[in-house]
Amino acid sequence: MLADIGLISLVLGLATAVYAAVASLVGARQGVRGEAWIASARNALVAVWPLLTISCGAMIWMLIAGDFQVEYVASVASREMPVFLKVAALWGGQAGSLLFWSWVAAAFSALVMFRKWGSDKALLPYVIAVSAATEIFFMLLVVFIETPFGKLDFVPQNGSGMNPLLRHAGMVIHPPMLYLGFVGFTIPYAFAMAALISGRLSDEWIHASRRWTLAAWLFLTLGLVLGGRWAYDVLGWGGYWAWDPVENAALIPWLAGTAYLHSVMIQEKRGMLKFWNMALISLTYGLVVLGTFLTRSGIISSVHAFARSAIGPLFFGYIALVSGFSVYWLLRRRAALRAEHRLDSIFSRESAFLVNNFLFIALALTVLYGTLFPLITELFAGEKITLRVGWYNQVTGPQMAAVVLLMGIAPLLSWRRASARRLGRALFLPTLVSILLVVFLILQDVRSLGALIGFGISAFVGLATILEFWQAARARRRTRGESFLVALNRIVVRNRRRYGGYLVHLSIVLMTIGITGSYFYQQETQGALRRGETMTLGGFTILYEGLDEWQEGEEMFVSEATVAVYRDKEQIATLKPRREFYIGHQQPVTIPAVRSTVGEDFYVILVGWEQIGPDQATFKVYLNPLINWLWAGTLMLIVGTLVAAWPSRRARLPVSAAYRPGMILTEKTSIV
Amino acid sequence: MLKRANRDSRRDRRRAGFKWMGAILVLSIVILLPTAAWADDGPTQDEVNAVSRKLFCPVCENTPLDVCPTEACQQWRDVIQTRLVEGQSEQEILDYFAEMYGDSVLAQPPPRQWAAWALPVLFLVLGAAALVFWLRSWTKPVPIAAQVVTEEQIDGNQPHTERLERELTEWE
């Protein structure tokens, strides 16, 4: 019954989206007289959202109630699962994730429809058409290929439950974040295509879609980091990034999207790179679809292989369609996309942005190439060769370091033509400090070149960025006599985009410190301990106190060791690393126990234990220095992005309060 | 009761592991070796891990061998242990696995997979070339007075400066 409601609602949603696409195009063809059609298309696109909400709601209801006759419910849910996991099971399997994905897409499109269109009304019909087309594609998959509403001929007693690896609080938020990020990039793409098709090629499409792009970028970033956090907490290998194909599938569009986020600034400021920006957002969207394809088709095996199926060819067709469509319109409008200005000097902010784009795109292509390498080698050499972490670190490390370094220099270059003397003055202190830091580290016996570069660049960029805040605030304090903190606040509020961006840059510096520390200075050791025996790693000592084993419900066995952690002969923590064994799935899950501080994580894994005989267990222990800087950096990144995306009060001021010639500028009426 | 069920399930898993690796002769030899191979004089677990970390088994998706909890990977680690006892070097053991199962098992691909590096390097070279080309063709010819200043700012651009000077003389 509920399954039928869900399916019917989904099909209605599909039909509505098709109508929205057709009606919007009809309306666009009829010009002024087509307004009614466009209004109707807009309403239809909004209506897809509630329809899919009913569909998802029905599925969630069935997951919670345990309607195991529905095949999808039986495959991802079980009676024993807590409610929040039952809800998360909506995206815990292939068919459900596609349904959820469609819902997210519908939500995004509906929200876009609610914005004030005002002067960019000409873009509206094509934004509707492109958004609807994306929704149609995903709904087609859900209706015809991977429906979660299919029923079994019998009613199983219980479901098999979600993949044990996915039963983690991070699982509840990580996939939705990724989906929001992926789907979010549909919106700027839709605006770009709308601008191309309608021929309204000024910057309005960029302004109109800027916040959506930032939102998509933020969600995608959070999805990536949360995925890393989930791996760190659940997979039990002491790391957070494995260059897994599915991780790469999200990283590649992120790289392209980040390039786009930067290069649109040149177009806004200088009217250049119009063609390139269009191409870049099309590429990002294409990579999003490709990423989904890689994730969902199982064409490249990964730890995420729970998401396999035969939807490959359809995806391939869709990617071809999207690429063809984008390329066609780009070429058709290329004459109108010429730059309004030329570069004044190679030594300028503009060219720094170009170098940024070059690095990001090279990174994206490199990671893409590595991800597809098994397919390529199978095609040309007949043997599937998978590239592993060693290769990825080698080929991406230098470019990443270059990107971070550029982050410190580029914001100091002025537009059009930079002055070497001013740049030198601004960079003097950061350079000096970072050199001193590197010398200090060498004296402290840090010998790894990578670490020296990583920390040196972090110090340089961090300081250069902080100086930007400091100098602006100081200048304002001097002219206005405000206190330093007030001045700091004012400069940020007055130019949210710039200083929000700088905050994001600072957060990347924090993350770089975390990555450098944990990558170059991770220590580990493994050993078997009898009860009462100890093992030492990097100043920490663990004492094995005992092992408990019990069964939890019908579902799993738990083996949990207790170890006391000592430092300088003083007990600082008791950790309980455990191994869960899921009976139904015949799958072990290693849950590490971690003691976290700002300086390092002490991370203990229970590797194995003797079943009979001496009370002995094997532990693997990691010391991950500075890793928490990575997570802290992420929090700062959220703040920075929100600052950059927050609507500024100036834009909301009623016309009467705006500046008129002759008006006296006071603190109240001006600037804020 | 609990212990037994646990043991049973472990046995099932081991059987599944055997099925996977059953065809492999070498491993079946290893299985005959005592599993409690943590002999006092043998290589330490850290030494085994040091090699394992550089390997990925073809079955477990993208999980390095030193942390993979499956039975199949335990057997691979036993192989490494045995070979270390036999006095083989790390490289010899890595070579052995690469020869048996292909280069995919190596965390660091060997130089014979040169194609893996060729394209990334090409991306960089072509990208840099395109960048330089665009920058040059987009830069507008500036008034000569300004050009002198610009050229001074770009350090070490010798041919440029020479050309500029030549042009300046001609102009005069």
Image (spheres, helix red, strand yellow):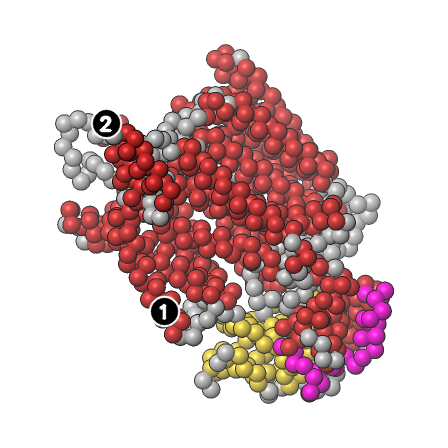
Q: Position of residue B140 (x, y in %)?
A: 36, 31
**Tag nearer the camera, 2 or 1:** 1
The answer to whether residue A449 shows anywhere in this view is: yes
Residue located beneath label 2 in the image: A656
Percent position (x, y) of residue A269?
A: 35, 34
Q: Chain of mark 1?
A: A
Label whose residue precedes the other's in the sequence (2 or 1) = 1
Q: Quadrant of the N terminus of chain B?
A: bottom right
Q: Position of residue A582 (x, y in %)?
A: 71, 64
The residue where tag 1 is placed is A439
Reply yes or no: does residue B35 show up in magenta: yes
Going 54% across and 82% down the picture, which residue do you hit? A536
Q: Magenta residues?
A: B21-46
* Vertical placement of residue A402 versus A628, above or below: above
Q: Residue sitting at 23 percent across and 54 percent down?
A: A485
**Pick the front one: A36 or A397:** A397
Residue A473 to residue A353: above or below: below
Q: Residue at x 42, y 68 (%)?
A: A598
- Going by the numbered disc 1, the residue's amino acid type is Val
Identify the subunit bearing mark 2. A
Q: Quadrant of the C terminus of chain B?
A: top left
